[in-house]
Each structure stands twice: as C-alpha cells, then as structure tokens.
Amino acid sequence: MIVYGGDWNPEQWPEDVWPEDVRLMREAGVTHVSLGIFSWSMLEPVEGRFEFGWLDRIMDLLAENGIKVYLSTPTASPPPWFAHTYPEALPVDFEGHTLYHGSRQAFCPSSPVYREKALAIVEQLGRRYGGHPALAMWHIHNEYGCHNGRCYCDTSAAAFRTWLRDRYGSLDALNEAWGTAFWSQRYSDWEQILTPRITPSFTNPGQQLDYRRFSSDALLDLYRAERDLLAKISPDVPNTTNFMSGLYWDADYWAWAEELEVVSTDQYLAGELGDEAHIDLAFAADLTRSFKPGRPWLLMEHSTSAVNWQGYNRAKQPGEMHRNSVQHLARGADAIMFFQWRASKIGAEKWHSAMYPHGGKDTKIWREVVALGELLRDASDVAGTTVKADVAILLDFASIWAQDHPAQPNTELKPIEIVKQWHAELWKLGITCDFAHPGADLSGYRAVLVPALYLVDDAGAANLERYVAGGGRALVGPYSGIVDDRDQVRLGGYPGAWRDLLGVTVEEFFPLRSDDAIELTGGGSGRLWSEVAHLTGAEVLDTYLDGRPAWTRHAWERGAADYLTTLPTGEALARVLTAVCAEAGVTATGTPGIEVVRRSHQDGRAFLFAINHTAADAEVPATGTTLDGTAVDGVLTVPAGAVRTVREAR
C-alpha cells in the first residue's frame, strides 16, 4: 500500500466537523493522517494537568473508519505556560535577542527544563496510545530545527563547552583545532568559550564550524530522548521525524538517518524557480532517498497548491499537484502526504492550501485530491520498491557549514546552489542520481561527482581515491578538497586532498565577479571562478581562451578522475557531465521536460514512471501495461502535463 493523507488538526474545528472530515477522507482515499503535531497546549493546558478526552474520541473515530495515525509528539511548539514559567528556556538569536512565545519552536534545544517537560508529555502520550488500534507510527516532534536550529544563549554556551570537552579532551587540542594562535584567540580556561556571537570582525572559522556540528547534535539528542522513551513504552511501534531535505541545511541528516527507523521529509515547491521548480523537487526526493540507501521513504508534507510563507505564493496549475506527487513516488516515496487535511480558517497558515480547501468540493484541488487517491490505490504494488542509480553526488553538511564562513575568496560560490546545478543538468540528461556522504561505500556507482566539497576529512579523501583506483570514474569541481575537517588549509598546492588523484596542482585562485564569464575553447563559458593550474600527470580536455587548463583528466590505476577549474554553465556543464557519464557507461537519454524514473523489486518486477512537464505530448520507450491495464508495446505516449506508470514486462 502507498500511504495517502496529511496532517489533520481537528482541535482547530468544532467537534461536529470531525465526522464530516472522516467521511471526506474516505471519499478521497485517505489511508493515514498525522495527528497532534501542534496540540501541546490542548493536551496540557496547565502545567501537569493533562486532558486527553478529545484526542481519545479522535483516535477512536479514525480506528472505526479504518484510517491509521502517525501520532505526533507535540514538542515542536511548547504552550504559553511554558514560556511564562520558564523564560530562561526561550531561544536567543545571533544578535542576542530573546525569541518569545507567539509562533512555534520557542525553546532552546539545550534547555534542561524544556527536555524535562517535553519528555513528560511524551510519556503521557506513549502510555495512553501506545497500544491503540489506530496507531501506525510515532511522528516524533516536527521539523527539528526549523526556526530554532541554533541558539546562542548562555545555556547553549554551557552545553557547547561540554560538547567540546567530549570532542577534544583538552584545551590544547581545541586551540590547535581552532587555530587560536591567529588574532590572539588562545583559550586558557573552558569558561572563556562562548557560542559564536557578534564580533568586531570575522568569527573564528573553527568555532563556527564546531558550533554548527554541536547544534545539529543538540537537536539529535532531543530526538533520541523522545525515541528511546517511546521505544520502552511501545517497542513494536516504529517511529520517524520529518526532515526538510533540500530546504534546511542546519542538521546533518547523514548522522540523523542512522538513528531513524524510517526516513521521512517535508518538501515544498519553490515558486521563484518558475518552470524548473519541479527539478528542485526531484533534487529533494533524490537527497531524501539517499539517506537510507535501498529503502523507501515517506513524504510527510507537501502542498496541494500555494503555500503561505514564500512572499509570492504561486498556486499550482491544473495537474501540477498530480505531477509533483508522482515525482516523489517515482523517486522512492512510499507515502504521499500533505500539509494539511482541511484548510485552516485561523492562524498564520490559513492561506496555505490543503486537501480539503476553503472552497469545498467543487474545486480543482478537491477533484485532484480524489484522483490522486485513486492513482495511489491502483499503484499499491509499487510499495517496497527502490530506485537504483548509477551516478552519485558527494555531499557533506560540514563542508557546507565551513564554506558558509564569510571570509572566502568568493562568497557567491554557494555550494548548495552548485550541487543543485549539477543535479539539474543530470535531470535534464535523463540520468537519475543518488547523493552520498564522502565516507560512504561508492563501489556500486559507475560515476561519482564532487561538485562542491570544500571540506573533506582524510577518510573521505582516501575513499574517493580507492573508488577511482578500483575502476571508478570521478569528476571533481573547483574549490573542492581544500581544507581538512577542522577547516584548516591542506598545504602544498590546491586541491590539497586530491592533488595526486587529479594530477593537477593549482597555484592560485582567480575568482570572477557575478556578471563576468570566462570563455571555454570547447564552447560555452565558466562563471564565478577560475584557477591557474599546472599539470602533474593529467591531460587537458578543455582550456580557457588564454590556454590555461579548464577541464583535465588523469588516469589513476584502473580508473580516471576529471577536474574542472571553473564552473561551466548550461550547455558547457551538460557537455562535461555527458562525457564523464558516457566514459563510465551511463548514457544520457533525456528528452527536454520529460522525467523518467524506474522503481524495482528485488524479484525483478519494475515500474517505469513517465512525467510530462511540457505542453506537448511525448513518447517514451516502454513495454508492459499501464496501471489501468492498457498494453504498451515499445512506445508509451504521455500526454502534455500528464503522468503514466507502466508495470514493465520482465
């Protein structure tokens, strides 16, 4: 079964609406709802006084109607009494401002009293509903770190010092790691160490990097505490917490995924991306799938139409929600869920679209919600299948955090944007890719791409070398391999970590202004960056017009590694990626605007998803039967703006 549904917030509505909601859910084909995400003040209106009667009735109503529940712990939004009684637990921003109650996430992740009160409500929920017939999974917290991913208060500073003691053991080791000999920053007492705060000039890069690591770990520790408590109470009930893959970069989701039974995420269309917004959705789906390779994942939230928080909140065109949903299904999701079930008439999200809109049933949204429910029911045998990719992109959160420091050769060199650009070109070429941590097993990939990995530790650097030595093909982008895991420069010439692997030594960086371009002999241009590179074994595949190397290739034992000294744009990047993938045995088969992805079972059954993002009909090679039983013999016609799924012939 493919799970279908969304967040349900019945506490926002009179009780006589609840049965109507459930009836409508059944009409739409809803199988699951997320429940109780922001209900702490309803469940514990006064500290220590719990009121579960309303939730009992909701849980029973859902069980009676065969709808399962992902029951949330409501700890993402403490109630007013918490902020009033424990103001020391409120978060503080980088500029020293206390962030007060009145929205959500108004707590410091390192606050002991927040942890105590959060676990108290979690225990009450676990003991009351751990055996309820409607309960399918615990939905722990909601979007950890959204709005409060980094707190700079004194409580956080004390917790940071404890974390640093555990990491380094001694002040001498910390001083060495942070390079505190620079600017007279050497610490002589642990108490002198604070969170990174406003300073007259640049903050210490090592301190900033470690604080980002600490902040991710502080949130992860909260998740573990809730998870472990619920596991003791209801050991047979699985759990998840919803990531924000591709939207949020303050949590190291590689580390988080190791702690989760099931990976889930929330993903929303970026309206400002216009005609390529669906490629950004594919990026987020591929990234989410990669956190637990070979396992399906859950789409906990996306939108039926417009959101409320983007400034310009574009409504989805007819059929667009359907295409977005099938994109996630095609790329490995076993659940397609929305925020939210019924559109709110109150609060900050009242203009956020929902499955049941303000306008009721005679609306585009409702008709598409019902049609999507029918499609997912017909695609039930897709559940459990996985996506196999031949290409991987290396991505590391610590590298992104380190490069985020403002003292860089070019602050417009944004690693996330570069990674997205490379992924987008692969999408256009029809090549499905995974993402991988630099230390992950890369042996199953034909090609490994490294668009923007400024920081890499010794293990990650050696891992890529072993991959290439074993016969793999790699492509490394500029300003990669530059520093170690302490954000200290690798000396001896850039790109330090992979200088030998790439057969190139870079003498100096020559950043470009945002409106400049550097022409390439092979066609097209590069932007934002250029280098003076000298060959130490590599061959030149393309140059700047002045003859300097722009693209090189170096044979390394059984494999080869390519290097770019600039950021090719558009057709130039497509030319490089096509060539590298072809050398690795991966053929570009893309048709402009047509998305084709395959999911398969271990027993050989496979499903081909074809999504037409254009205004013209398209043809896709396929053999098998569509979900409605229509035979496909070699060619599948996909109407403009439509999706088709084929159960492929074995």
Image (tube, grey):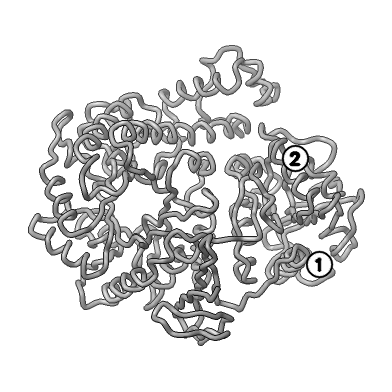
Which circle's residue, 1 or 2, is located before the other in the chain?
2
Q: Secondary structure at mark 2?
A: helix
Q: Position of residue 372 (x, y in %)?
A: 34, 72
Which label is found at residue 520? 1
Q: Is residue 184 above or below residue 27?
A: above
Q: Secondary structure at mark 1?
A: loop
The quadrant of the rendering that contains the N terminus is: bottom left
Which residue bears the numbered disc 2? 462
Taking depth in this image into account, of 466 and 203 the one nearest to the observer is 466
Quadrant of the rendered image containing residue 106: top left
Answer with left or right where residue 615 lies relative to residue 22: right
Quadrant of the rendered image containing residue 477: bottom right
Q: Position of residue 490 (x, y in %)?
A: 77, 36
Q: Position of residue 135 (x, y in %)?
A: 25, 47
Crowding at mark 1 (Cα within 10 Å: few <14, some 14-19, many 20+): many
Q: Is residue 597 above or below residue 486?
A: below
| Residue farthest along the top direction in this orientation | 188
Q: CA distance from mark 1 to mark 2?
A: 31 Å
Question: What residue is at 68 percent from the left and 54 percent from the top?
Answer: 451
Taking depth in this image into account, of 634 and 496 the one nearest to the observer is 634
The residue type indicated by label 1 comes to Leu
